[in-house]
RNA sequence: GGCCACUUAGCUCAGUUGGUUAGAGCGUGCGAUUCACAUUCGCAAGGUCACUGGUUCAAAUCCAGUAGUGGUCACCA
């Protein structure tokens, strides 16, 4: 017998070598599987893209959980004999990466990006991205991921850039992308616009001030932001409000409001809630989304009073160049001094902050690029909108979301979706493929001919390129074989926290650009929390590098610990005890093998011989029931259940009962032949079932068994 | 505020279409162990399935409500 089995199983000594063997075999690549005749060329396909990790950092336990689920699906389907493709890649994560590198440079060198210049700064970002990329790849290999590395992609590489520009141009030509001047979410800290989805609300205490613009102004208004009121051009009231009906349509001149001259028109708008505050709303078209919309409806003038640095851009001496927070106090004091303040009330309110920089969002009117989600266009002879495309594939179940409850959330989100602001004033990302020359505008995949054309300085929202991921990784816009063979992908597996950011955008991009869904199924997993149920975060210091845990317990144990007990969409807690338990389990499988090797060195495994014995026939029949059960669980995405059932069977049925009972039988020469075949058969079949969950140890044992020709990773999944 | 999820053993969680005596792992207690097991095995204790009501021959499971916890979306100026 192999000497190795006399020691406890030590994953650290084995796993890297096993992974290397897999890689060298080439079987992660379906083309090789076909060539080597382990997969039929006309077999059904299974394809899945890896949600590309951000190069802004390295992997955490949540990513490890994701990788475990996906690798289970991939290995299972490969063993079923399908043409199986899992495509790896990483995401440049534009704003997240840029702001991280900016912070580092600021801290180390005291410089900002403008000190370095666009070219030098981008070099630094790329270096940072590459380092993280290499770590991420190493981490994924440690987890045992059977990704086809020959097809690795990056959201910002040349091929993906072509896809981005191609889609942009198509949308531009279809009138779905437009450049427009309107109030956007401006992040003064990151010096860029962000989309509605990149806003994080923070609850804070604030004061609600109620006042009049001047002594003879008839209506009092309420606000938490008095400094913006120097930009007011109207007061809106509800059309039904009897108190104010007499003033509607009139314009009042205010000669001095905190040093500014105002011209306020009283308008009636049904959006105004007469119950709130004084029932009158001071309209600041330039610095509020809602007020902007009201101003559009009533054709009100626009008066910007705040600039990109969150400072007052008015000319009057009191407020000029003051930060908004200072200006607020100055205006409040001015109101008190002039006896215009009626009430100051402490309230709690949610303020908008930028997800990546933490900067307080300042709504500003700016000229930006948008995707119009409500504009009709013609596709396959039908009039559609992007919104309708996104809704219909979920509503008619062309795409399935697991767990189902997220379908409702998705529909709700899409229904309320507004135009998507896609331009960013940052440097790291896909440059907008638009050029300007005097009054001319050119949009194209390539730069226009001739001199004096200047390219738009902005880059695209990172989710624009991630949205193309399912087909850009397959070589689109070229009509590649991969695209024909593997799109739409079979399943998209990702965290529920990026359902809107990413899943929705992929559906938008694919149904638009290809007229085809990006995936047939969406499987959403939950968050991995620490043993106290807290979110993993830097500030708590509870972040664990999966590689460290793997070094201690082995990748198989880590995978099992993450999978067992965690259903789709559910958050999970992870603890040392759980890792330990599955390390024990790995050793149990190891010892089971040792016992069988000692008593059945050739690993005889003929089930026909075994079933001569009635009891063994029952064992084997029971096992077939289990096999079917496990298969159904996996097919229905119940990996947690399949894993637990296998664990339980191997330890408490196979080891505790079947092996225990076999000890006597092996001693008697008359039944030992049957017993050997029964044990050998069940061992081999169990290794196959366990392989997707615990690939390393099962492959290791398989290779140590006599007569094992193929690698376990390309053995056939047991069927009845 | 809207919507969603969760509440089952000390802890972490299963319990699929309603159907024997509600399960597992960890932990606890007792015992065994020259044995494939450094990481072993057996036995045991431990539950008002959050609460109230309903449907049903039958409810942890379905329905309605209440409470608590968490999430998410939208925010009112």
Image (tube, rainbow, N blue to C red):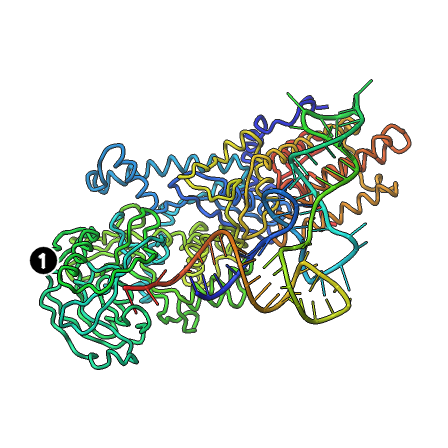
Point 58% across, 26% down: residue: A13
Q: Is residue A35 above or below residue A12?
A: below
Q: Position of residue A286 (x, y in %)?
A: 21, 63
Looking at the image, which residue sits at the far right? A670
In the rendered image, the quadrant that contains the N terminus of chain A is: top right
Name which quarter of the figure residue A282 lies in: bottom left
Whole-percent x and y of residue A517?
48, 61
Above or below — where is A584 with respect to A638?
above
Closer to us: A425 or B30? B30
**Is A507 on the left or on the right of A285, as rendered?**
right
Q: Position of residue A304 (x, y in %)?
A: 17, 61
Nearest the eye: A329 or A499: A329
Q: Which residue is mark 1?
A: A315
Picture quadrant of residue A126:
top left
Q: Nearer the viewer, residue A258 or A490?
A: A258
List x then y, in percent, for residue A612.
Answer: 88, 41
Q: Residue at x 47, y 62 (%)?
A: A410
Using the image as rendered, state which of residue A466 and residue A404 is in the foreground: A404
| Residue A399 appears in the rendering | yes
Chain letter behind tag 1: A
């Amino acid at each position: 017998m192999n000497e190795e089995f006399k020691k406890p199983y030590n994953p650290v000594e084995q796993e890297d070598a096993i992974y290397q063997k897999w890689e060298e075999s080439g079987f992660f690549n379906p083309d090789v599987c076909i060539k080597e005749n382990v997969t039929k060329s006309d077999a059904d396909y299974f394809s899945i893209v890896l949600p590309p990790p951000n190069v802004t950092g390295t992997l955490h336990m949540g990513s490890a959980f994701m990788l475990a689920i996906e690798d289970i699906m991939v290995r299972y389907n490969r063993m079923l004999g399908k043409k199986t493709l899992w495509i790896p890649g990483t995401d440049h994560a534009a704003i997240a990466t840029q702001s991280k590198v900016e912070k580092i440079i600021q801290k180390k060198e005291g410089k900002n990006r403008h000190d370095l210049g666009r070219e030098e700064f981008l070099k630094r970002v790329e270096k940072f991205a590459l380092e993280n990329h290499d770590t991420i790849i190493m981490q994924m290999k440690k987890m045992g991921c059977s990704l086809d590395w020959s097809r690795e992609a990056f959201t910002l590489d040349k091929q993906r850039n072509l896809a981005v520009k191609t889609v942009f141009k198509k949308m531009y030509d279809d009138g779905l992308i437009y450049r427009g001047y309107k109030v956007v979410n401006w992040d003064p800290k990151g010096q860029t616009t962000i989309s509605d989805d990149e806003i994080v609300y923070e609850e804070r205490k604030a004061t609600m001030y109620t006042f009049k613009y001047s002594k003879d102004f008839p209506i009092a208004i309420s606000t938490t932001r008095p400094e913006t009121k120097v930009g007011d051009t109207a007061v809106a009231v509800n059309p039904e409000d009897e108190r104010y009906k007499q003033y509607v349509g009139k314009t009042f001149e205010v000669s001095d409001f905190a040093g500014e001259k105002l011209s306020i028109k009283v308008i009636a708008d049904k959006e105004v809630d007469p119950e709130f505050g004084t029932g009158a709303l001071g309209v600041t078209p330039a610095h509020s989304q809602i007020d902007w919309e009201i101003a559009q409806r009533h054709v009100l003038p626009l008066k910007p009073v705040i600039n990109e640095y969150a400072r007052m851009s008015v000319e009057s001496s009191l407020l000029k160049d003051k930060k908004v927070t200072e200006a607020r106090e100055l205006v409040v004091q001015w109101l008190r001094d002039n006896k215009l303040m009626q009430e100051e009330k402490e309230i709690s309110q949610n303020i908008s902050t930028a997800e990546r920089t933490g900067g307080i969002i300042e709504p500003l009117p700016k000229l930006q690029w948008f995707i119009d989600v409500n504009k009709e266009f013609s596709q396959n002879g039908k009039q559609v909108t992007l919104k309708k495309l996104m809704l219909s594939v979920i509503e008619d179940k062309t795409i399935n979301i697991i767990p189902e409850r997220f379908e409702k959330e998705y529909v709700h989100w899409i229904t309320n979706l507004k135009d998507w602001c896609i331009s960013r004033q940052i440097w790291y990302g896909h440059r907008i493929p638009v050029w300007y020359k005097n009054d001319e505008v050119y949009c194209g995949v390539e730069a226009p001919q001739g001199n004096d054309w200047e390219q738009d300085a902005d880059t695209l929202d990172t989710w624009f390129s991630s949205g193309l991921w399912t087909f850009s990784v397959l070589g689109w816009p070229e009509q590649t074989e991969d695209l024909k063979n593997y799109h739409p992908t079979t399943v998209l597996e990702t965290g529920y926290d990026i359902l809107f950011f990413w899943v929705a955008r992929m559906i938008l991009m694919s149904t638009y650009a290809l007229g085809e869904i990006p995936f047939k199924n969406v499987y959403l997993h939950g968050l991995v929390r620490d043993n106290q149920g807290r979110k993993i975060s830097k500030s708590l210091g509870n972040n664990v590098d999966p590689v460290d845990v793997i070094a201690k317990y082995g990748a198989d144990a880590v995978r099992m610990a993450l999978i067992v007990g965690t259903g789709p969409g559910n958050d999970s807690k992870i603890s040392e005890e759980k890792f330990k338990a599955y390390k024990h389990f790995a050793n149990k499988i190891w010892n089971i093998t040792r016992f069988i090797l000692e008593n059945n060195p050739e690993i005889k495994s003929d089930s026909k011989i075994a079933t001569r014995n009635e009891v063994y026939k029952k064992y084997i029949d029971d096992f077939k029931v289990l096999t079917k059960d496990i298969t159904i669980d996996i097919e229905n995405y119940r990996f947690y259940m399949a894993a637990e059932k296998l664990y339980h069977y191997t330890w408490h049925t196979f080891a505790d009962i079947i092996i225990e009972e076999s000890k006597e039988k092996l001693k008697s020469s008359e039944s030992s032949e049957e017993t050997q075949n029964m044990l050998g058969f069940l061992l081999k079949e169990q290794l196959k079932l366990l392989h997707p969950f615990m690939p390393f140890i099962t492959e290791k044992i398989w290779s140590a068994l006599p007569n094992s020709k193929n690698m376990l990773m390309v053995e056939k999944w047991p069927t009845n």
